[in-house]
Structure formats: structure tokens, C-alpha cells
Image (cartoon, rainbow, N blue to C red):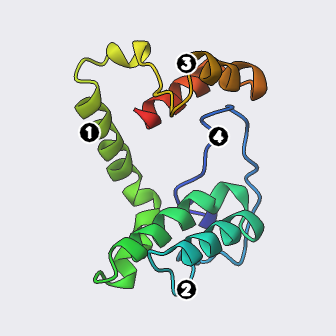
Amino acid sequence: MSENNKFVQSQDSIFGREISQEKVGWFGDRTPLVLGAKNDKQSLKRLKQKCHLSLPPHLRCAVWISSIARAANPQLPITETDAYGTIGNKKSIETRWEFALNAVFPNPADRDDAIAPDLGLTQEVLNELIHIDYPIPDEGAKQITLVLC
């Protein structure tokens, strides 16, 4: 298994674009976490910068998940928080997402009819943002709606 296949791969579920799968030799067996990550604004800013500037796009999700797990659970051993970004935990993440969706939408058919919260805007302005200002495909708009609900 190559090092790129061990980790949760980032996906563009909003626009549906392909994310480059460049080979990264320095990534190693563990995700390169942001050292000293804490649950504060400065650490979050540093984590975002590191994810955007120095990591290949397809591995950003693995680093983000592992770093957030470490900051949220400082009592856990590092090896356990490192594992959060690996493919072995992907099923666990997907199961938790499905659990959250089922809690919000007990009837799965309701997911198709969900309306995104307007976030202090009107639905008309929100629709303009999604469909005109930042043209997002319908499937991407649906994903945003599910996350916001």
C-alpha cells in the first residue's frame, strides 16, 4: 500500500472537481500534525495555513482530522490521535456522519427536500450566493445544506 493510500483522501464534494493525487515521499507512515495544536484561535489559524500552503491537496483532510483529534483530546496518546486520519478510521467517520444525518432527518427522503438555514440572509439572497455568485452544482448545494442543517 503506498503512503497516499493509508490516509483519508480529501474530496471536493461541493464542486465535484478532481483533486490531484500527487505522490508525496515525505508524508511517511504518520500524518504530519501541527505541533503544539491547541483549541485556540491562533492554533487553528496555523493549522489552516499549514494545510493550505505546505500539504498536497489530497492529504489535507488526513492532517486536519488528526490535528483536530489531538487538540480536542489532549489526554489521548499521540498514536491514537494519529490514527484518526487513516483509512482505517474512514468507516468510523462515515458512520458518525450517517448517525448525525439520521438524527436531523429521521426520514431519509427529507434530505432531498431540506432547506439550508438562511444564516441571517433571506432564502432569496442565499440562493443567489449559491447559484449566481458562486455557481455550485445542485449536488454540491445539497451537500452544503446537509452540513448546515
Amino acid marked by disc 3? Gln
Query: Circle 1 sits on which residue?
Result: 99
Residue 145: x, y in percent?
Answer: 49, 28
Residue 130: x, y in percent?
Answer: 66, 25
Is 135 placed above or below 2 here?
above
Query: Circle 3 sits on which residue?
Result: 123
Amino acid marked by disc 1? Phe
Q: Spatial distance from mark 2 to mark 3, Cα to Cα?
A: 41 Å
Dot in front, 2 or 3: 3
Residue 26: x, y in percent?
Answer: 70, 78
Earlier sequence position, callout 1 versus callout 4:
4
Amino acid marked by disc 4? Asp
Q: Closer to the camera, 1 or 19?
A: 19
Left or right: residue 92 compared with residue 12 = left
Query: Circle 4 sits on which residue?
Result: 12
Q: Is residue 6 visible from the viewing direction of this image?
A: no
Left or right: residue 125 compared with residue 122 = right
Earlier sequence position, callout 1 versus callout 2:
2
Q: Secondary structure at mark 4?
A: loop
Is 19 placed above or below 113 here?
below
Dot in front, 4 or 3: 3
Left or right: residue 55 compared with residue 117 = right
Q: Spatial distance from mark 1 to mark 4, Cα to Cα?
A: 22 Å
Image quarter (top left, top right, bottom left or bottom right) of the C terminus: top left
Earlier sequence position, callout 1 versus callout 3:
1
Q: Name the residue rendered at 33%, 13% in the picture.
A: 109
Mark 4 Cα shell of 10 Å, populated few (<14), some (14-19), many (≥20) = few
Q: Closer to the camera, 13 or 21?
A: 13
Amino acid marked by disc 2? Leu
Q: Secondary structure at mark 3?
A: helix
Q: Secondary structure at mark 1?
A: helix
